[in-house]
Image: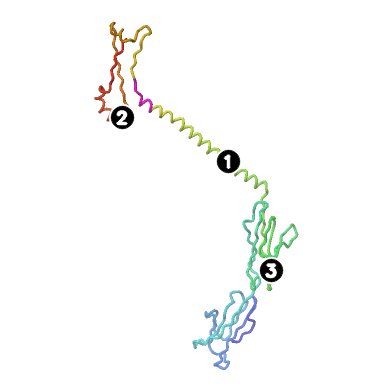
Amino acid sequence: FERFGDETTKDGDSVSLTCINGCDGGNLSSVLTWLKNGEPINEGPVLYLSNMSITNSGNYTCSLKTHSGTTSAAINIDVEYGPKNTSVSVRPSMEVDAGSNITLICSSYANPPVQNYTWFKIDDDDIIAVGHQPVLFSGDGGQYLCSATNKHGSQNSSVVTLKMKQYWATFIKDVLIIATVAVLLIVSTVTAVRRLNKKRTRAPESDCEEDIQNADYVNWPVFDNDQSQEGNQCEETTVEVIYATVDFRTKRKPNMEQQMDSNNDDENVIYSTVCR
């Protein structure tokens, strides 16, 4: 293996790899195959890699195409590059209530990894550095961006704008929520009380109906004030006799049982003689 260039290269550079077959005395006419990470990629004694990028990183070997088991030792090529895809993520959101803290996270892809982060806040026409860590905690609204740097360069993220809700807007929102909940509770309570009162009003009616159904009725004669109710006078004078009956029923029976017991009503009747 004869290689021209460094094993560690930067994106955009070019690299040339040469494979020499020692059995041919350095003759480059042998049919050689180039492999990257074990997969064939090209043929010939020389492999040219131009405009290197991250996709060119890997292990390279060469072997004789006509002879198996003649693979060379591997050379690792590591393509380094400056920060790429630098961005800012915001938690919990870019608009929060006044007095809340916001977390800003700066992320970037780089090889070697990012060595320095810098946070900037744009204040009117001024750009002020406000932090040097990957994570920034802020309690103020405004425009922010981050910069990621390694030995191959730096890259800035896009600008993010943080908004703080006004206190009165938040206060009014909370008041509306509390008022809505209170109204719902009042309506539910009034409805429940009305239903309970209706049930209590209906209860005595059912009791009265039961009392009427279970009542026993008596025919009671009415006397004049100058008439005597004693038995001796009834015997001495001719009077009109009125018969009254009292029917005792201890329990209301079903219709079928009432019809069967209708023939035995005379046995349950008490007769009394009343003078008029």
Q: Which residue is label 3 attached to?
A: 116
Measured as percent of width and height from the top left, residue 21 is found at 56, 90
Nearer to me, 245 or 138: 245
Residue at 63 percent of width and 81 percent of height? 7
Residue at image mark 2? 253
| Residue 137: assigned label | none
Closer-to-camera residue (90/12): 90
Q: Which residue is mark 1?
A: 182
Q: Indicate the position of residue 35 as horizontal and vertical percent values.
A: 54, 81
Q: CA distance from mark 3 to mark 1?
A: 54 Å
Lower position in the chain sequence, tag 1 or tag 2: 1
Residue 84 found in image quarter: bottom right
Q: Residue furthest right?
A: 126
Identify residue type, mark 2: Lys
In the image, is residue 105 above or below residue 96? Answer: below
Q: Label 1 amino acid?
A: Ala
Q: Could you tell me if the residues under marks 3 and 1 are in contact, i.e. CB atoms within 8 Å?
A: no
**Residue 254 is covered by the magenta coloring:** no
Q: Quadrant of the N terminus?
A: bottom right
Q: Amino acid at mark 3?
A: Asn
Question: On the rendered structure, is 26 left or right of 139?
Answer: left
